[in-house]
Amino acid sequence: MALTPAIIALNASGIKTAKKLAAALGAKVHGREGRVLEADVWFGNALDHVRDLFAAGVPIVGVCASGILIRAVAPLLNDKTAEAPVVSISDNGGVVVPLLGGHHGANRLARDI
């Protein structure tokens, strides 16, 4: 995994975990406008933002439901050996699930988290 992951926070309940991860990974928190109070990068539409990051090859760590991440990137899936890592984390950080990109560091990233 060459690129620094984007830490996605969709609501206030996940921002503490997102900030902690960002600090540990040297990453930026991408926060949904109107839902979180603190972020380094702001976005309005979660599906579009995650899809754009994934298309650009940016590893994604979403502090959100797995389904949101899956629905965002599903139209872009075509080569598991080339896809960026996508990891889902519960708001409290207790559950970490690598969803995609095992060939490019998702499993390692999930273990590190």
Image: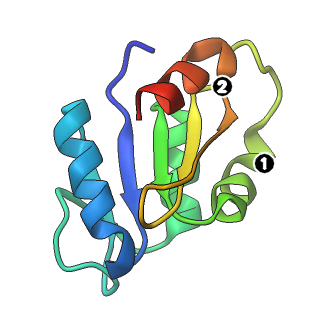
* Residue 28 visible in the current orientation: no
The count of marks equals: 2
Which residue is labeled 2 in the image? 101
Looking at the image, residue 103 lies above or below residue 83: above
Q: Residue at x 67, y 21 (%)?
A: 102
Q: Position of residue 6 (x, y in %)?
A: 36, 43
Task: For marks 1 and 2, give the one nearer the viewer.
Answer: 2
Image quadrant for the C terminus? top left
Residue 81 vertical position relative to residue 88 in the rendered view, above or below: above
Residue shown at the point (16%, 71%) measured from the top left: 38
Percent position (x, y) of residue 47? 59, 64
Q: CA distance from mark 1 to mark 2?
A: 13 Å
Q: Amino acid at mark 1?
A: Ala
SS for dot 2 = loop
Residue drawn at (49%, 53%) of the image: 62
Q: Is residue 28 left or right of residue 59?
A: left
Say if mark 1 contacts mark 2, CB within 8 Å. no
Mark number, residue 74: 1
Q: Earlier in the sequence, mark 1 or mark 2?
A: 1
Quarter of the picture containing the N terminus is: top left
> Residue at the bottom extreme?
34
The kind of residue tagged 2 is Gly
Q: State the image quarter where residue 15 is shown.
A: bottom left
